[in-house]
Amino acid sequence: MASSLSTEDDVLDRLKKNVDPTVLSDREAAIRKRASEQYEKAQSRLKDLVDDNSTLPVTISSINIDGAKNTRTGFLQKVLQETFAKSKEPGFTLAEALRELSRDCHTFSRFGIFHQPTLYVDLAGQSGGKTKLNAKITLRELSRFILKTGTDMGNTEGSGYLSLTYRNVFGGAESLNGYASTGTRTRSAYEVNFQAPVNANPDLILEAGGYASSRSHHYYSSHEEVLRGGKVGVKWGEHQATYNGVWRQITGLAQGASPTVRCDAGDSLKSSLRHTFTRDRRDSHLLPTRGWMVRSESEVAGWGGLGGDVAFWKNEMEAQMAAPLGASGISVSGGLRSGLLYPLSLGVGDNKKPAQPSRINDRFQLGGPTDVRGFRECGLGPRDGNDSVGGDVYIAGGANIYFPIPKVGPEKPLRLQVFANSGRLVGLQGLTEDGGNVNSSVEGVLKELGNGLPSIAAGIGLVYAHPIARFELNFCLPLVKRSGERGRKGLQLGIGIDFR
Amino acid sequence: MVSLPIPKFLKTLFDSFPLLTYPANPLPSRCPKFGTAPSLYVFTTPEDAVSGNPSFNPSCLKWQAYLKFNGIEFKTVPSNNHASPTGALPFMISQQKSVSESTEMTVIPSNKLTAWIEKHGYSLEEADMDSARAKAFLALVNAQLRDAWLYALYLEPNNSQDLAGVLYCGSSVSAVSSFLLRQAKAGARQQLLQAHPGGVLDPREIYASAGDALEAISTILGRDTWFFGGRDPGLFDASVFAYTHLILTLRWHSKENALLRAVMRHDNLLGHEKRIRDKFFPEAKTPDPDHRLEG
């Protein structure tokens, strides 16, 4: 029952999300082309009409909303509020009225609870030297319950999931989502999440949720991590701010686990505030050929009255750029990113504890086929025995040149790539449980970053950007590394959604 | 995997990569550094770990005492069961010189500690633990005394809150502490139910058999300095001390201190506890006479 409800939405969702037109089949492309030609023709006819009358003074006397039976009237009114206010201003013209109304339609569609709205405008006589307009917006609500099961392709992890979404819970575009998954590395993950737009604004969204998961980190560091936590946050535009409280447990150690992992086993609590900012101007995030992206992520844990038993300031920055080389179909892309974990003193007043050295589950990991190619996953940085124990500071960067494949052409999301990438991950030295000078330790580690060349690998390979994930098969050779770092000589397969 | 023969020139070419290898990255600050002395991972507080004071867990204290009897220098490290290769503390990490001169860390779980100590400790003139008699008495300690200990610590309402909760389930968030304590109590109950099938745990019966066990242990010690007439304290002395010392020094709730009262009845066991404490743990907490009187 539920799955039959979802099919229709599913297809539409996927079509909507499918931002990369190159992957559409020829037939679909042809249909689209015809439709868009008709649309353009209609648009240009409308445009002529509007252009002739664009300065006509108008006022909007009513907006009829059709088909929003589960949505609150107050919510709909809030969306239209601004349009009505503007329509009362003296210089309001037909062109402005149409712009306002289509903006409202766009707003409705962004809540994710309606199909694409349709707009109809009619004349309703004259009043006070102004032409009165009646507008009608036809909305069609998406089904309220969606049950989805499927397989997910994360960064080098395959998993199966079950997700249940209850859309438009209180008639104000709120959504409640339940999610359960299990995979090759995620033994189990559960999440419940509630989202609601504030003041009927799709750009300001409140979020609250709880989660529990158990993940295996045996492939690089001989342990499992169990998380149980909750978060509340707000999203506005490209920003997101979240409070996160999580109980972490390092358990299920392998027989050969290193003393470092044994030392960090057990419980810890993180109470943190996090802010992320992303500005993405790339044409595609799976295989960008032009544009740029910047991202920054900052987290403060355990500082002041936050509580928990870990305290640090963590910051990560990333920048990516891509540009085509003329009309050859060849494009280049480059990226640089860095991260720093700065230990802070924990608590306030008499309970204040000096800054503690970081734990394995707070430190950064680096390396892997979707990260720094030519190295195994989390294969860079300090190692204790068989375990990658992570580091407090990293810097990584890379450059790719994408060549279209002869006879396949640049329209297809298939490329030959030549790349070189590098990274360096180091740990803070000289801190103890009783404290230590964090600043001089950070200075020391920054100096160490510039000590010699970073670890470098280069290679050549094939890239295929499928709409759900990017696949890469590379032949790579590590050129420079630190003793103990795990390079990958020869073929390396990368599957993921988040390539660096 | 299909392995294809690799042409020789390709292999030589391959082997030349990476072109440059720097020395290994140093470990981050929190990673444990090991000297020549082995580290015993036990339940203890950070302060007690530094001063080498007794662990608050009987199994840990037993091995801690036995290592001391054997004159082995070691340091104690605060830890928890998640860290242990067997799922239970204690365990030891020791540096081992391998043939290639590089040092290698070996993890020794508690069930391999006897063999390790035999190799590294003094040869003590302790009593033979393989005799049937010694085994029978060890079983008394490991069953009756342990059951009463578990009951007193985890299932007596006040003790579990004020002792088990603080010692084993401390966390900066009270919801997490109480979740951990609930888990620990359920674990203790399950262990006790294995020994007392039928689904009912009668504290009187559990304490009474612990009392009988202490009576028997006291009789076997008699007027000897160490158990079974050994010239040095042995593993059995360590096993008994681990319980008597903790029973005598823990601040039991006055209405839930049946075990304390049972130990107090045997002067020779009190003397045994004091002898070991004075000789091997001079800085340890002494039993509080005022607190004892409350009983």
Image: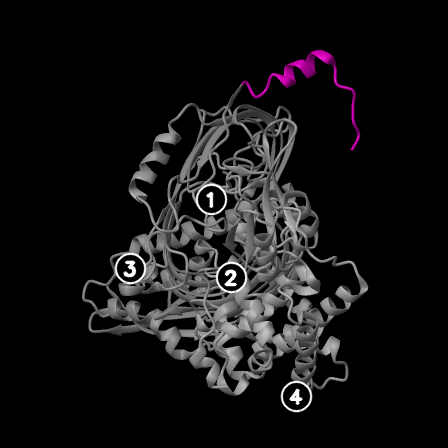
Q: Nearer the viewer, mark 3 or mark 1?
A: 1
User: For the residue marked with disc 3, what is the amino acid?
Assistant: Glu
Q: Are marks 1 and 2 on the same chain?
A: no
- A73 is within the stretch colored magenta: no
Q: Secondary structure at mark 4?
A: helix
**Disc number for residue A96:** 3
Marks 2 and 4 close (CB-CB < 8 Å): no
Disc 4 residue crowd, few under 14, some 14–19, many 20+, Cα 10 Å: few
Range of magenta residues: B1-19
Q: Horizontal and vertical percent for residue A265?
A: 55, 54
Spatial distance from mark 2 to mark 4, Cα to Cα?
Answer: 29 Å
Spatial distance from mark 1 to mark 2, Cα to Cα?
Answer: 37 Å
Q: Which residue is mark 4?
A: B204
- B17 is within the stretch colored magenta: yes
Q: Earlier in the sequence, mark 2 or mark 4?
A: 2
Spatial distance from mark 3 to mark 4, Cα to Cα?
Answer: 87 Å
In the rendered view, does A253 fall on the left or right side of A246? right
